[in-house]
Amino acid sequence: PKPKPPRYDLLGVIMEPNHAIAVLREAKTKSTFRVETGDMIGGWYVAEIAPKAVSLRWTDGKVRKVPLVEQPH
């Protein structure tokens, strides 16, 4: 059975011309993860990393976008 979509917060993104890294925090455990396109997290694949969002894709093609968390100044 497909697990529920994981609940992550996107804390930051590092973009380079041919490479991107995202830092995600799992909401329940507060664990942080550094991911790249193609990595798997919580049973979902990191499909795309953009400057303000990460797309996670399940094996059936369903996509969940995780928006960047706006930090207060």
Image (cartoon, grey):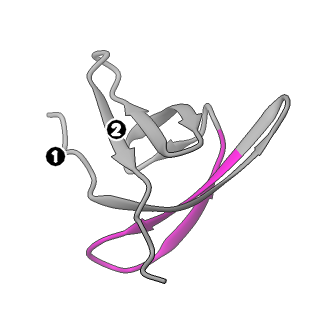
Residue positioned 39% across, 80% down in the render: 30
Q: For the residue carrying disc 1, how many other residues have a C-alpha within 10 Å: few (<14), some (14-19), or many (20+)?
A: few
Which percent across, then down, holds residue 73? Answer: 49, 83
Earlier along the polypeptide chain: callout 1 or callout 2? 1
Q: In this image, 7 relative to 11: left or right?
A: left
Which image quarter is the N terminus in? top left
**Mark-to-mark CA distance, 1 and 2:** 14 Å
Q: Residue furthest right?
A: 17
Number of dots carrying numbers: 2
Residue positioned 47% across, 34% down in the render: 45
Q: The disc labelled 2 sits on which kind of residue?
A: Lys
Q: Which residues are magenta?
A: 21-36
Which percent across, then down, holds residue 13? Answer: 63, 53
Residue position for label 1: 4
> At numbered mark 2, what does the secondary structure look like: helix, strand or loop?
strand
31 vs 51, nearest the viewer: 51
Q: The disc labelled 1 sits on which kind of residue?
A: Lys
Compared with 70, 7 (above or below) is: above
Quadrant of the image occupied by residue 25:
bottom left
| Residue 30 is a magenta residue | yes
Residue positioned 59% across, 43% down in the render: 51
Compared with 45, 33 (above or below) is: below
Q: Residue furthest top?
A: 61
Disc sitting over residue 65 in the figure: 2
> At numbered mark 1, what does the secondary structure look like: helix, strand or loop?
loop
